[in-house]
Amino acid sequence: ATYGVEGLINAWPLDEAYIDYVVGNDSAGIINDVKNFPVINEAVLLGANEAGSETNVATGFHAIEFLLWGQDLSQTGPGARPFTDFVVGKGVNAARRSTYLTVVTNLLAKNVATVKAAWDPKVATSYGATFAAQDVNVALTKVFKGMSSLLTDELAGERMYVGYESKSQEDEHSCFSDNTHIDIIENVQGVVNVWNGVYGRTQGASIKSLVDPATAKRVDRALASALAGAQALPNPFDSLLIADDESEERKVFLDTILTIQDAGTSVKSAAESVGLELPVE
């Protein structure tokens, strides 16, 4: 169930024209397609999400982001959707747009609550209880794999290097709000939290304590470098995508990508140091 809602929560990239108007097509999207989508409700958006294409994203964080900010047509700032888009009598299909925003936001809250409930260890049939009850090495392999693949494949690869290569704002993770630099920082911070067993005021057993001190220090240094690199990225992220190849910005961008990849490799090495073999996808 938890994996099933992932595509409803964080699907990306998103084709803006699948949801609403875009430059050059004022009648684009579900919001403006009254004939095929006479009603906008939860069932309709669930059925529309990723229908026919992975980029036909109708739900989740990025759908909400696009509805709030609109297309990012600037190289120096986020999208600038006018508030009148949601004012009846001012924006075309304003009432439908407001309905869409309400429905998709409520749906996101519901799906996030589903994930939270799935990790409740007090419920015997929950994913959390099942996870804790499985063989310890199987569980640890999943934890190490999640940490390593997030850094190496998802973050450094899909969310950063693809944009580095394409130089397209369309490949920026949170392009509408220009929140990408924060996304990157928090992705790395999430791995740091798991490694140390610390989240805010909550503390628990750490993955770090399972490995030898020398390996732990290497991972500490690698994660610290990755986090520092992420925190040093400029805002807006667009500036890194469009900069000249020989510019300092592009060098910083690539160096940060490689530093984050190195952190993922260090986590993988830590897993191997305790006899775990991470699966290759």
Image (tube, rainbow, N blue to C red):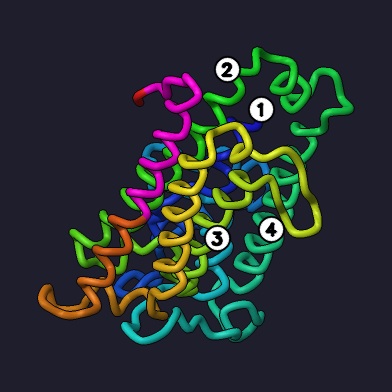
Q: Are marks 1 and 3 in contact (CB under 8 Å)?
A: no
- Rendered image: mark on residue 168: none
- Where is residue 257 shown, x and y percent of the image? 31, 58
Q: Secondary structure at mark 1?
A: loop
Mark 3 and mark 4 lie on one chain; the one further toward the N terminus is: 4
For label 3, the residue is 186
Is residue 45 at all visible to an observer of this figure? no
Query: Which amino acid does the dot numbered 3 rest on?
Result: Glu
The C terminus, quarter of image: top left
Tell us which disc is closer to us: 3 or 2: 2
What residue is shown at x 64% (from left), y 53% (from top)? Answer: 40
What residue is shown at x 45% (from left), y 65% (from top)? Answer: 174
**Label 4 to label 1: alpha-carbon separation:** 19 Å
For label 1, the residue is 1
Dot 3 crowding, Cα within 10 Å, few <14, some 14–19, many 20+: some
Which quadrant of the view contains residue 74?
bottom left
Query: Which amino acid does the dot numbered 4 rest on?
Result: Thr
Tell us which disc is closer to us: 4 or 1: 1
Q: In the image, which residues are magenta?
A: 260-279
